[in-house]
């Protein structure tokens, strides 16, 4: 297998999908991943959320956040294939970078020194 990396796949689907339509979209993602020899590490379903700006005159969308393991040359292929689907409003594939998860320690609050007596 080629070199792989971790990716985040963020999908926004039409908000009014039935359970069956939603499952069809998840199956489509799974099919694309199998074609690309990728695996799902984790799936977060955020459900219907308000959008930052209207897309297709809609103010809400159904969010699916996938954590994936993919060969390095496949993310664009998956992204373009999912963009073709009618119920998909937005697709974003981002390479997961470990340095984004580290938090810098907060500086200790400065304590004013007591005046000398």
Image (cartoon, rainbow, N blue to C red):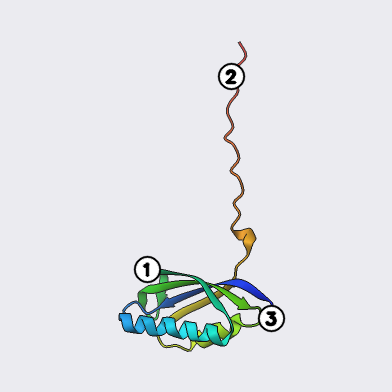
Viewport quadrant of the C terminus: top right
Tag 1 near tag 3, CB within 8 Å: no
Report the front residue among 34 and 26.
34
**Residue at (60% x, 77% y) in the render:** 70
**Residue at (48% x, 89% y) in the render:** 84
Q: Judge depth for marks 2 and 3 and give the one in front.
A: 3
Residue topped by disc 3: 2
Quick one: SS at disc 2?
loop
Report the front residue among 32 and 16.
32
Q: In the figure, is residue 82 to the left or right of 61?
A: right
**Residue 4: mark:** none
Earlier residue among tags 1 and 3: 3
Q: In the figure, is residue 7 to the left or right of 19?
A: right
Residue topped by disc 2: 114
Q: In the figure, is residue 52 to the left or right of 80?
A: left
Residue topped by disc 1: 49
Q: CA distance from mark 2 to mark 1?
A: 51 Å
Q: Judge depth for marks 1 and 3 and give the one in front.
A: 3
Q: Position of residue 52 (x, y in %)?
A: 42, 68
Quick one: SS at disc 1?
strand
Viewport quadrant of the N terminus: bottom right
Q: CA distance from mark 2 to mark 3?
A: 63 Å
Q: Position of residue 5 (x, y in %)?
A: 64, 72
Tag 2 near tag 3, CB within 8 Å: no
Snapshot quadrant of residue 89: bottom left
Report the front residue among 41 and 111.
41
Earlier residue among tags 2 and 3: 3
Quick one: SS at disc 3?
loop
Q: As displayed, is residue 66 above or below residue 78? A: above
Q: Position of residue 6 (x, y in %)?
A: 60, 71
Q: Position of residue 75 (x, y in %)?
A: 59, 80
């Amino acid at each position: 297998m080629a070199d792989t990396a971790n990716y985040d796949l963020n999908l926004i689907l039409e908000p009014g999908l039935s359970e069956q339509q939603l499952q069809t979209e998840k199956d489509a993602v799974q099919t694309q991943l199998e074609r690309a020899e990728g695996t799902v590490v984790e799936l977060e379903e955020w459900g219907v959320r308000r959008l930052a700006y209207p897309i297709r005159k809609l103010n809400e969308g159904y969010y699916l956040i996938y954590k994936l393991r993919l060969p390095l040359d496949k993310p664009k292929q998956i992204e373009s294939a999912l963009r073709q689907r009618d119920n998909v409003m937005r697709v974003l594939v981002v390479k997961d970078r470990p340095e984004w998860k580290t938090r810098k320690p907060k500086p200790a609050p400065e304590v004013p020194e007591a005046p000398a007596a």
